[in-house]
Amino acid sequence: MHVMNVGNTRRDRGGMTLVEMMIALTVFGMIMAVVMGFLVGSRNSYADTRERVITQQTARAVISLLTKEIRSAGCDPLDNGFDAFGVAGATGFQVRMDLNGDADFNDADIDELVTYVYDPATGTLTRDGGEGAQVILRGLNNLAFNYFDENGAQIGGDPLSAVDRARVRTIEVVIQGESERGEIVDYSTRIALRNI
């Protein structure tokens, strides 16, 4: 026969009370908030880094193109004596080169007369190789072209006179861009002319 003890109830049932459950949920919620904050921060950091890298890679590609064309400026295999620069200023320049050796730099089928222009109003850099101006870089806060002579002294004037353009031996390109997420990216390089 089984006798039930009514006055002596067991308190150790192995379950959780409502207070214990609330404390556990609160601690779990705080841990999840910290983990979620870390994950969101990591995702934002990754996105910022990715945008900065894309902006830098775009700037490097443009600098690579500029470098190729600046180094070719003044290429004159038949020694016709034309100027390497048609125009040179703080926000743009025009390079001339005779790449196919036909005694001129005005061929329509090859980039022998190339103009770069930075437009501060739109934050864009355009390139015109004879087919019309094409935007090659966007999102610029600033872009400047600086010119140096054979001794490394900066040549002043904007635009440069014909005499000063003939003295140019190095061009410095200074770019300040902004990624889509607002990251500022600075890039600068100096490019030496080879054909002068």
Image (spheres, rainbow, N blue to C red):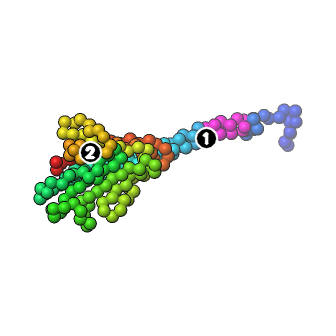
38 lies left or right of 114? right
Among all residues in the image, which is located at the extreme top?
A: 8
Q: Quadrant of residue 75?
A: bottom left
Against 6, is 117 above or below?
below
Image mark for residue 32: 1
Amino acid residing under circle 2: Ser
Q: Nearer the viewer, mark 1 or mark 2?
A: 2
Q: Main secondary structure of the magenta part?
A: helix
The amino acid type found where label 1 is placed reads Met
The stretch in magenta equals: 20-32
Q: Residue at x 18, y 39 (%)?
A: 150
Q: Is residue 176 left or right of residue 189?
A: right
| Secondary element type, mark 1 | helix
- Residue positioned 19% across, 61% down in the render: 104
What residue is rendered at 70% in x and 35% in y? 23
Q: Is residue 78 left or right of residue 129?
A: left
